[in-house]
Amino acid sequence: MTDYFPEPGPVSSGTLRTEDLMRATLRELERHNPYDRLAVEARAVAALHAAGWTFNDGTIYESEQASELLNGMLDRVTELTSKTTVAARIKGVAQPYLYFGLHPDDGALLGYWPENESEE
């Protein structure tokens, strides 16, 4: 795991396509830990897609398995973000508590958001 301290804000906007969200989430997951099992799986999905593989007569990104992988990746980035936030605070770096996911008011914005933002 690296000392990656994300800033609040979007990393992707204007899309809800699994393929786009998975690419953006993979970039963030790799910043935290490029060897994470879910990052390896996402790179494999991207390679299969690039090779033209289909899944149940649709692209691999349209499969239920891709949606499940994306949800797992979103949860994993949030988990890693929480760990780096605690590490930053221990090191004396002021860091807000963030979660990674879709913005509560705009579902086409994927990024890091303050945990209490959805409560305001």
Image (cartoon, grey):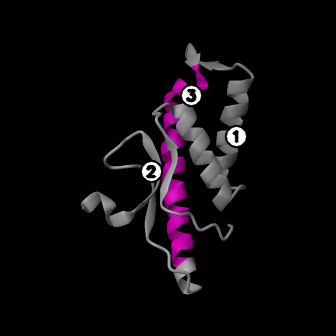
Q: Residue 100: x, y in percent?
A: 47, 55
Separation of disc 3 and disc 1 at Cα? Answer: 12 Å
Q: For the residue carrying disc 1, how many other residues have a C-alpha within 10 Å: few (<14), some (14-19), or many (20+)?
A: some
- Mark closer to the observer (2, 1): 2
94 shown above or below 112: below
Q: Give the range drawn in magenta.
A: 59-87
Residue 101's disc number? 2
Q: Name the residue under label 1.
A: 43
Disc ID at residue 32:
none
Q: Nearer the viewer, mark 3 or mark 2?
A: 2
- Specify the quadrant that holds the C terminus: bottom left
Quadrant in the picture for residue 84: bottom right
**Among the two numbered marks 3 and 2 on one chain, the one whose residue lies closer to the N terminus:** 3
Residue 85, magenta (yes or no)? yes
Mark 3 crowdedness (10 Å alpha carbons): few <14, some 14-19, many ≥20: many
Q: What element carries label 2?
A: strand
From the image, tell me which residue sits under label 3: 61
Amino acid type, residue under disc 3 in the picture: Tyr
Q: How many labels does the image show?
A: 3
Q: What residue type is labelled 2?
A: Gly
Q: Which amino acid does label 1 sit on?
A: Arg
Which type of secondary structure does the marked residue at label 1 adopt?
helix
Q: Is residue 47 above or below residue 99?
A: above
Q: Residue 83, image x and y in percent?
A: 54, 71
**Mark 2 surroundings within 10 Å by alpha-carbon count, few (fewer than 14), some (14 through 19), many (20 or more):** many
Q: Residue at x 63, y 18 (%)?
A: 54
Q: In this view, does 66 lie to the left or right of 43?
A: left
Q: Do the residues labelled 3 and 1 touch (CB within 8 Å)?
A: no
Viewer-nearest residue: 119 or 44? 119
- Examine the structure image and report whether residue 54 is included in the region drawn in magenta: no
Q: Image point 47% across, 33% down: which residue?
A: 15
Query: Sequence-wise, which precedes: disc 3 or disc 1?
Result: 1
